[in-house]
Amino acid sequence: MADKQISLPAKLINGGIAGLIGVTCVFPIDLAKTRLQNQQNGSRLYTSMSDCLIKTIRSEGYFGMYRGAAVNLTLVTPEKAIKLAANDFFRHHLSKDGKLTLVKEMLAGCGAGTCQVIVTTPMEMLKIQLQDAGRIAAQRKLMPETVAAGTVETKSPTAMQLTRELLREKGIAGLYKGLGATLLRDVPFSIIYFPLFANLNNLGKRGVEGPAPFYVSFISGCLAGSTAAVAVNPVDVIKTRLQSLTRGSTEDTYSGVTDCIRKILRNEGPSAFLKGAYCRALVIAPLFGIAQVVYFLGVGEFLLSFFGFNELSHSAPSTL
């Protein structure tokens, strides 16, 4: 699909606003996903997403469901900006020599997914430690046999404390632990999501050049997002396990992607790679649905126009 003339600044504003709203709405489900994915045989504290959220509220209060949200909210805007800008850049250059075919759309998505890990990896690294801290604390109280003898309970660290500790002990590489697994998740996700959304959205267009109705873009975003999310969930499980620094005494540690796959298959079986898939679909679908709402309303264009940037053209939601 050849993209119309669009305003990149407006797209970045829309992407940032969509990310902030979306993360705020679905973060508790994302927390449940992380905790469910990190559970190993012999240390299962939660039986389902609802059980996880109920136990989290009981033991940590309502705001316990938002552990790590500050990191996500801080970095989601640059993450979305890089992802959207990269996708537009690659789509533009790949369409110069003719029609933007499905293969070219997939290549553009591949480029976008590769670029976004610059921000995604450290964001996920910090977020996972904060999200999973409550699970480890609950294990100490409810399942003490899973905690190493003599282990002293410590106060949950803040994002800044974690950052300083990782930088001091391992340098910048500490923040990029799990980079390979993040690439293996985000590149296929973007390869699936961007072309699938664009083609689903095109099916509901009003005429050849007319935009798709709001509800078509919303449904297309939800369907494409949830499909891509479930498809890459096995790699998301691997990424979560590799990036988790604190574990119970009975839980496995991993030296890399291959070692993680081998131990999960041996100790938990193939079904372990689907842990949190339902939660992940519930997280991603609203995130991209909300993004389409923001794009449809033209929030970024309104703000730019309000501040005097009237010459910027209206962006099209179909290239998200």
Image (cartoon, rainbow, N blue to C red):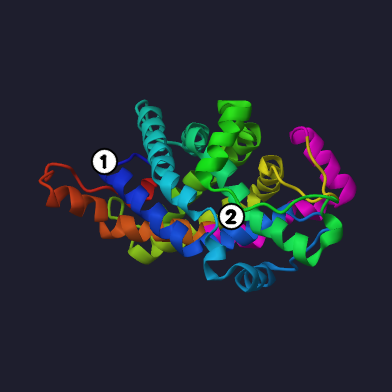
Image quarter for residue 125? top right
Q: In the image, which residues are magenta?
A: 255-283
Image: 319 above or below 51:
above
**Which residue corresponds to mark 1?**
9
Q: Is residue 224 left or right of residue 279?
A: left
**Which residue corresponds to mark 2?**
227
| Residue positioned 41% across, 37% down in the render | 82
Residue count near mark 2 (Cα–Cα under 10 Å), binned few <14, some 14–19, many ≥20: some
Report, in whole angstroms, how far the alpha carbon at label 2 lies from the one at label 1.
28 Å
Q: Is residue 66 magenta?
A: no
Q: Is residue 257 left or right of residue 296?
A: right
Q: Secondary structure at mark 2?
A: helix
Q: Position of residue 211 (x, y in %)?
A: 30, 55
Q: Nearer the viewer, residue 81 or 206?
A: 81
Q: Is residue 261 magenta?
A: yes
Residue 204 in view: no
